[in-house]
Image (cartoon, rainbow, N blue to C red):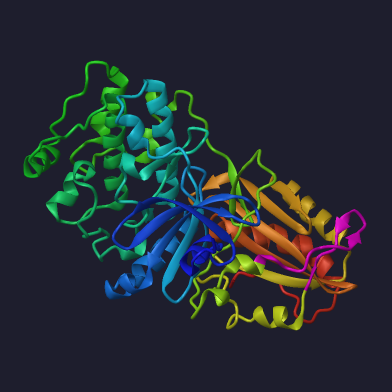
Amino acid sequence: MERSKSEKAAAAPLLGRYEIGKLLGHGTFAKVYHARNVSTDQNVAIKVIDKEKILKGGLMAHIKREISILRRVRHPNIVQLFEVMATKAKIYFVMEYVKGGELFNKVAKGRLKEEVARKYFQQLVSAVEFCHARGVFHRDLKPENLLLDENGDLKVSDFGLSAVSDQMRQDGLFHTFCGTPAYVAPEVLARRGYAGDKVDIWSCGVILFVLMAGYLPFHDQNVMNMYKKIYKGEFRCARWFSPELTKLLHRLLDTNPATRITIPEIMEYRWFRKGFKLLKFYIEDDQVCSVADQGAEGAGEDVGSSSDQSSVVSEAESETMEPRRKIFPGLPRPASMNAFDLISFSPGFNLNGLFEEGGEGSRFVSGAPVPRIISKLEEIAKVVSFTVRKKDCRVSLEGSREGEKGPLTIAAEIFELTPSLVMVEVKKKGGDKGEYDDFCNRELKPGLEDLMREGPSLGSRLPSDTE
């Protein structure tokens, strides 16, 4: 029997790329589905947002802020946003599919063993520290927003209530009442303004208590009575809690935010440090990769809108550049550039930084062979003990020191202008801008000057103090 038009539409891949599966969850403005990328066979979760409801609710700025935040906090213990697409009626967040479900479901069956609870708490604190270093505060941490992947590793999700530093008032505090009642900090209840980092730390304390006890530290059938307990900090540790854990929980659930423990102090606690390993990862092609993982493929993201699905905008498609088919000695040929590519380098045309934190970078033209350019970049990296990662005509240099915004990571990509002329594009992919500028001026610029002289001076430039 022939299928109806609606059945055919349901069977067709979303935007020609994703095969939609079962509904995973829904809220007022959005539904989340399991989906499969038909070209890569990758499982993803797609959050479908009703654009009309968002516009009526005046929440478009809220959605844009969520996209910006998810681009800023790419970490192994945070659910990753792969790309954002839009049609006239819908916005689609294509996200990492975390198949293990909510940590809440695990705790609902009973308290966890201490070593298991410690592992989840360590991963939670690592993710929260990463967010705070980038000026992002979650403000709704709870077991329902913590997911588990197939390896049993924790992933922080749902940044819908998150805030960034520039939302603070002149007093340096947030004033929006938000969060889940049982996990909300006393200073939020007081409605006198609060520090985002301190609020997240309180929520981490409540989560740790729940993991270890199997029940909430502050609980009452009457919400106002529960708020009174939170405000006074009235809770009792279970008899099976060790003295070290009890001491840590009292520091986490300190009702005074000024004396409440900080994340660096948490990470120095002996209970926390047991079995703790600092995660090492890097970003390649907008994909979070562990140091051991060399083969990840990723996609960028952008928000576009169109009158129909056929003209959907997605930055992921811009990654499908001319393939590197012809071979240099031992290397693929760099991607070629046409006139439109060159015009797009003008700041007025470049949209790459629409939702990105950084965007710092420079380009120069050289007549030097590609292998020589790559060797020179490796030499520079060796001088400052940077790790080098190579893939085709792209080189990533990663610093060994952890700055406030993570290790300094610089990406260099080589493009072919003519058979004898290439352009090298250098970008900061992670880390502090001041550290990036210092590295460029002290190491990169002097190290690449000889290569610049091998090409024409037209358009050649490198990072300077003013960039």
Q: Quadrant of the C terminus?
A: bottom right
Q: Position of residue 117 (x, y in %)?
A: 38, 27
Residue situated furthest front in the rendering: 1
Q: Which residues are magenta?
A: 319-336
Q: Residue at x 75, y 46 (%)?
A: 382
Q: Does the magenta-highlighted stretch encompass residue 321? A: yes
Q: Residue 254 vs residue 129: left or right?
A: left
Q: Tell me if residue 131 comes above or below residue 433 in the rendering.
A: above
Residue 144 placement: quadrant: top left
Q: Position of residue 102 (x, y in %)?
A: 38, 39
Q: Does the magenta-highlighted stretch encompass residue 112? A: no
Q: Tell me if residue 341 comes above or below residue 318 in the rendering.
A: below
Q: Do we see residue 243 in this rendering?
A: yes
Q: Closer to the camera, 82 or 436?
A: 82
Mostly what secondary structure, the magenta segment?
loop
- Marks counted in the figure total 0
Q: Residue at x 37, y 21 (%)?
A: 114
Q: Quadrant of the N terminus?
A: bottom right
Q: Position of residue 266 (x, y in %)?
A: 36, 34
Q: Closer to the camera, 375 or 14?
A: 14
Q: Tell me if residue 361 comes above or below residue 276 in the rendering.
A: below
Q: Residue at x 41, y 68 (%)?
A: 64
Residue situated furthest right in the rendering: 329
Q: Tell me if residue 109 comes above or below residue 423 in the rendering.
A: above
Residue 424 placement: quadrant: bottom right
Q: Closer to the camera, 252 or 437?
A: 252
Q: Residue 217 vs residue 96: left or right?
A: left
